[in-house]
Image (cartoon, rainbow, N blue to C red):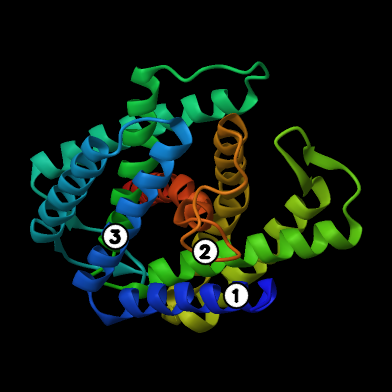
Amino acid sequence: MNETLKRSISGAIYIILLLASILYSTESFFIVFGIFLTITIYEFCNLIQTHKVFPILFGIVLYSSITLVSHYNKITTTTINGLFDTNIEIPINVQQLNIVLLAITLVVSAKCILFLFYDKFQKISTSSKYLYLLGYIILPFVFITKISFGVKDYNPKIIIGLFILIWTNDTFAYIVGKSIGRNKLFEKISPKKTIEGFLGGIVFAIFAGYLISRYYIKAKPEFSEKSILIWTSIAVIVGVMGTIGDLIESKFKRVAGVKDSGSIMPGHGGILDRLDSVIFVAPIIFLFYQILNYVS
């Protein structure tokens, strides 16, 4: 079997599994992403060369506990744009938990960005390894599920829309970069990425956000303009932060001296290779939602 065929088959299986889990039920969504989290922890532990058993057990327990608490404590009322809720009644302990988890994740995200731009080779300390595992891997998966809690009941359109934006950005960044790319974006980490590709990906992601808001979300007429603004804003966040997330994972792989995070998906690498953008974007989208909810 040639490489292109293997890549196509494994990619198709991944997309079908992803969409089926999101569309079937909340529980299937939680379970499949819990499995993705377990594999991602395993792959990341290989990259940073640390023991796997404790991080995997800790990640599963933390992910399961937080998603269950968040899901069964959530009470929603009215909606805006058919997308976000304006009044959300959450027990204060869950609300405080969200703030603490978000703060930890954002601090670690900032640490990841500093790690990306740190020129000299550095050996990652043991404390940093576990900090990255918590804030760069485990908690972002929690926020992927929490994004769906920002709607009335469970709305798979939010997650699917987010993945469409990420796939659109990645695809057109590659196409534009390969076609007209001349100026390297961050050559020492990712030699193939170009500034032209980066900007092209964002432009097409914004267009995709517009189409999602008009034809997929289908907001009520009185909320149409707000829905477009929301989704195009999310597209910009995806384009910028998703690219940074991809570069950060490339930096971890470069330090580890490997091409891919794993080999579970022939032709694509590991699960972390497929989700590096979304796990970095998810906490920022959750923060964006919180700000939107507050100003609404």
Residue type (three-letter) at the residue carrying disc 2:
Trp
Q: Nearer the viewer, mark 1 or mark 3?
A: 1
Q: Quadrant of the N terminus?
A: bottom right
55 displayed left or right of 262? left
What kind of element bears circle 3? helix
Residue at mark 1: 6
Residue at mark 3: 35
Q: Residues within 10 Å of mark 1 (few under 14, many from 20)?
A: some
Residue at the spot x=25%, y=60% of the render?
149
Residue at the spot x=26%, y=37% of the render?
55
What kind of element bears circle 2? helix
Distance from the alpha carbon under mark 1 to that under mark 2? 34 Å
Q: Nearer the viewer, mark 3 or mark 2?
A: 3
* Sequence-earlier tag: 1 or 3: 1
Residue at mark 2: 231
What kind of element bears circle 1? helix
Viewer-proximal residue, 49 or 212?
A: 49
Residue at the spot x=42%, y=46% of the render?
43
Position of 137 relative to 118 (above/below): below
x and y, in percent, of residue 113 in the image? 55, 29
Position of 216 relative to 250 (above/below): below
Residue at the spot x=36%, y=19% of the render?
126
x and y, in percent, of residue 246 in the image? 59, 46
Residue type (three-letter) at the residue carrying disc 3:
Ile
90 displayed left or right of 177? left
Q: Nearer the viewer, mark 1 or mark 2?
A: 1
